[in-house]
Image (cartoon, rainbow, N blue to C red):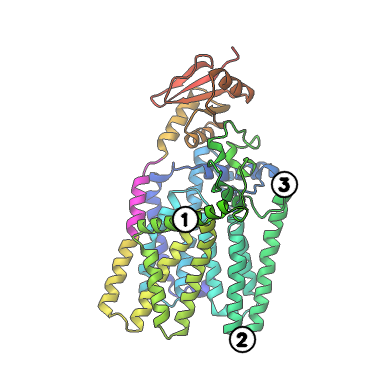
Amino acid sequence: MIIEQIKDKQNLILVLLLYLCLSAILFSNFKYIINSDGIAYISIAKSYLSGNISHAINGYWGPLYSWLLMPFIAIWPGNLENVISTKILAIIIGLFTLIGIYLILNQLKFNNLLKTIILLALIPFMFYFTFNYITPDLLVVCLLLFYLNFLMDEKYRKSKYMGLITGLLGALAFLSKSYVFFFFLIHFILTNLYYIKKFPVDGSTVKKNLLLGLSVFLIISGIWAVIISEKYGVVTIGTTGSYNYALVGPESNGHANYYQGILKPPNESSVSSWEDPSYFQVKNWNPIKSSQNFNHQIMLILNNIRDIILISFNLLFIPLLASILALFLLFKTRERSTKHNIIFILGTMILYTGGYVLILIEERYLWFVFILSFLLGFYSLKMLYEEDYIKNNFFKSIIIVLAILLAVYPILALGSYTGESFRVYEVSIDLKYHGINGNIASNDHWEVMDYFGYYLDSKYYGVTKKQSDLELKEDLMYNQIDYYFVWGESPPDSLGEIVYENKYFRVVQLSDN
């Protein structure tokens, strides 16, 4: 079905080959980049492979990304090799994301030249998404683009089996990130109701697709919800949303692992407590419980909107300008298909952003919206040209300028990330050479220490609280800490012998004396 939609295979194949060749050239500059989320996904994948299913089942991290990592880890074991495997997986996901973008461009009836220009313009963003983070957010982008492609296809209203495909893609996106659950339900239902009203002739088929799609989605997501609900003893589709909402509450002090002192990893195969934040003690809150909470929610929304504007500034305001241009075209055009496409894409962007605006905004959460806004901007320019609102020369010039501007931010960002995390790996090798392994803790630098814990095949218990030397030693001994990393100061003599030091930190081997 997808193959049938690819009309100019040659141009697409050339773009994909260029993407793969450039990925291979750039790969060595970014292969060491690691983050704590990535360590959690790798650890979960290892648990699945070793048969520790109870450890692998996790309410905070969606399972699909770890499932996709499993073949790479099985074939190519090793800590650094696992990190490299996440980059290879991300490149593959980026490849399919470009295909997804191509399919959306087909639905919007771009010609071959424009499709090629847009795909080339978005390659730097694929590198940025691929190399800078270990995260399932690009996987979500990829799956939702394919979902939108099938939903926008005219065949959706003609074939009763399209609901099966859209429901499956929605479920896979949910298994990547639980945030997708409510987005899919609302988006899928509203879109189908819109089709039923706009295309009454196809109403019977659309209704069947609606029921089939919802059934497939709810069965698959329901199975996973039952599994994690059983583990945590509470009915849930995932713990990410509740944790993040507590995180931004009026009494929150931030992530618990930064201020609650030593936190034991949730199981024997975990690197740190971050593998399952579901177990963190957080303060839940209700925005309608008091006027103070309600005001906090309003300020939260306003601050998140401000953050979106600031993020858009980094992208030269292209997402905002594209949305404004689309709104202008929406009120100017007389073409029903143009109005339909703008409403569909803009509505999808607003709905997807809306959930995050209520809680928390991070740039990577909005990757899907950014891609849609770029496509919407190109589409609006194309339609303004076709409806004679702009002249040929101006249209060609603005397309080229926009394509160049799109590459600015990701190229600058990639330049700043070149070679990152190599030093962490290098120090880890040196620490391992000196025999440092086991249960570790530190007085600072939680995230870097998590990386050390991963490379040292150790368990990182976190950052200790401010306390007296005696209380510190009792805390460390109670938690059976083998090595204590002290950053930026001299460790108490009572803790034990310094077995490693550099200009940044010292490592103390704990003793009973």
What's drawn in magenta, residue-wise? 407-420
Image disc number at residue 231: 3
The residue carrying pointer 1 sits among few (fewer than 14), some (14 to 19) or many (20 or more) residues within 10 Å by Cα, namely some
Q: CA distance from mark 2 to mark 1?
A: 40 Å
Q: The N terminus lies in which quarter of the figure?
A: bottom right
414 relative to 196 in the view: left or right:
left
Residue at numbered disc 1:
304
- Residue at 47% across, 19% down: 491
Residue 216 horizontal side relative to residue 272, left or right? right
Tag shown at residue 200? 2
- Residue at 52% from the left image edge and 62% from the top image edge: 354
Quarter of the image where one finds residue 390: bottom left
Marks 3 and 2 sit apart, C-alpha to C-alpha, by: 45 Å
Amino acid type indicated by mark 1: Asn
- Circle 3: residue type: Lys
Check disc 3: other Cα within 10 Å, few if <14, some if 14-19, many if 20+. some
Q: Is residue 460 magenta?
A: no
Task: Check the picture and name the quadrant holding the C terminus.
Answer: top right
Residue at left 40%, top 74%?
Answer: 326
The percent position of residue 373, horizontal first and vertical second, equals 42, 66
**Dominant secondary structure, magenta:** helix
Q: Is residue 25 placed above or below 122 in the rendered structure?
A: above
Query: Whole-percent x and y of residue 424?
Result: 44, 34
**Residue at image point 47% right, 35% down:** 448
- Quadrant in which residue 324 is drawn: bottom left
Q: Is label 2 or label 1 in front?
A: 1
Q: Can residue 20 be seen at all in this image of the molecule?
A: no
